[in-house]
Image (cartoon, rainbow, N blue to C red):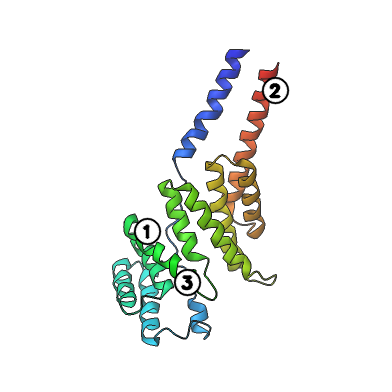
């Protein structure tokens, strides 16, 4: 009986250890900003219109896969306005897309710093920095940043919000959920992942992770029961 219990324990623990060392690969960085607000006249009016246009062109370049051109445009923008948090944030995305995490961290951190002084902070700078730090293994700081991102989003919570808003919330809860799971705080992870599925029922990753946690929990219960006998 003891040997059977040991086999079950090894089978359960080995995948968990492997997962704790390997963070799931996220989709390619997504350009996050308030461009729709800018086009509707809701953006920060203190930003030079010429720089906003250069920023818009950088976004078009990025979405067309012209990452180098987008990077150059954004560097031009922040060289002339060092308070433009969105430009710093998306410049971080550009460097992350080019597999230069150290440079990405530099610009994400500045975006987070600037964002905290904004009248209406964006959820994206702490989200982007939190995800990258999670991938790098800095789980404590990453958790704090992901919670900061979710808090900013909740401050603007609306029952009639369009689906993209809920998809963004779902992404935030999912990233927090897998981070908490890697920290072996399974109850909190389960709660965050459940919120992710509630915000966007079509988002499959949180559902798959919830199913995996349920399987591990059942295995743990069976093992504990076997060892008590």
Name the residue located 66 percent from the left edge and 19 percent from the top edge.
227
Name the residue located 36 percent from the left edge and 82 percent from the top edge.
51
Image marks 2 and 1: residues in contact by CB distance under 8 Å: no
Q: Which element carries disc 1, helix, strand or loop? A: helix
Q: Residues within 10 Å of mark 2 (few under 14, many from 20)?
A: few
Label 3: which residue?
Answer: 33
Q: Which element carries disc 3, helix, strand or loop? A: loop
Q: Is residue 20 left or right of residue 203?
A: left
Image marks 3 and 2: residues in contact by CB distance under 8 Å: no
Label 1: which residue?
Answer: 105
Residue 12 in the image: state x and y as whole percent. 56, 28
Task: Calculate the distance from the C-alpha at mark 2 to the C-alpha at mark 1.
Answer: 46 Å
Question: Observer-nearest residue: 23 or 147?
Answer: 147
Task: Calculate the distance from the C-alpha at mark 1 to the C-alpha at mark 3.
Answer: 18 Å
Mark positioned earlier in the residue sequence (3 or 2)? 3
Q: Is residue 26 left or right of residue 221?
A: left
Residue 2 in the image: state x and y as whole percent. 60, 13
From this view, report whether residue 97 is shown above or below residue 59: above
Name the residue located 40 percent from the left edge and 62 percent from the top edge.
109
Task: Calculate the distance from the C-alpha at mark 3 to the C-alpha at mark 2.
Answer: 51 Å
From this view, report whether residue 159 is shown above or below residue 25: below
Query: Does the rendering let one see residue 186?
Result: yes
Mark positioned earlier in the residue sequence (2 or 1)? 1
Label 2: which residue?
Answer: 225
Image marks 1 and 3: residues in contact by CB distance under 8 Å: no
From this view, report whether residue 62 is shown above or below residue 189: below
């Amino acid at each position: 009986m003891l040997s059977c219990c040991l086999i079950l324990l090894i089978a359960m623990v080995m995948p968990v250890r492997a997962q704790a060392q390997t963070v799931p690969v996220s989709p390619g960085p997504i350009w996050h900003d308030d461009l729709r607000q800018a086009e509707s006249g809701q953006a920060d009016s203190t930003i030079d219109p010429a720089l906003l246009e250069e920023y818009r062109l950088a976004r078009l370049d990025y979405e067309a896969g012209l990452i180098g051109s987008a990077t150059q445009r954004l560097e031009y923008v922040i060289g002339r306005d060092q308070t433009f948090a969105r430009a710093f944030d998306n410049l971080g995305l550009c460097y992350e897309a080019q597999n230069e995490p150290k440079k990405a961290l530099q610009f994400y951190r500045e975006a987070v710093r600037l964002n905290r002084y904004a009248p209406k902070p964006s959820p994206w700078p702490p989200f982007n920095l939190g995800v990258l730090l999670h991938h790098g293994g800095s789980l404590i700081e990453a958790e704090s940043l992901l919670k900061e991102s979710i808090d900013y989003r909740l401050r603007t919570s609306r029952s009639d919000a369009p689906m993209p808003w809920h998809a963004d919330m779902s992404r935030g809860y999912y990233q927090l959920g897998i981070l908490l799971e890697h920290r072996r705080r399974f109850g909190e992870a389960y709660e965050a992942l459940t919120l992710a599925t509630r915000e966007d029922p079509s988002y499959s990753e949180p559902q798959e992770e919830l199913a995996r946690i349920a399987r591990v929990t059942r295995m743990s219960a069976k093992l504990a029961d076997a060892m008590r006998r």
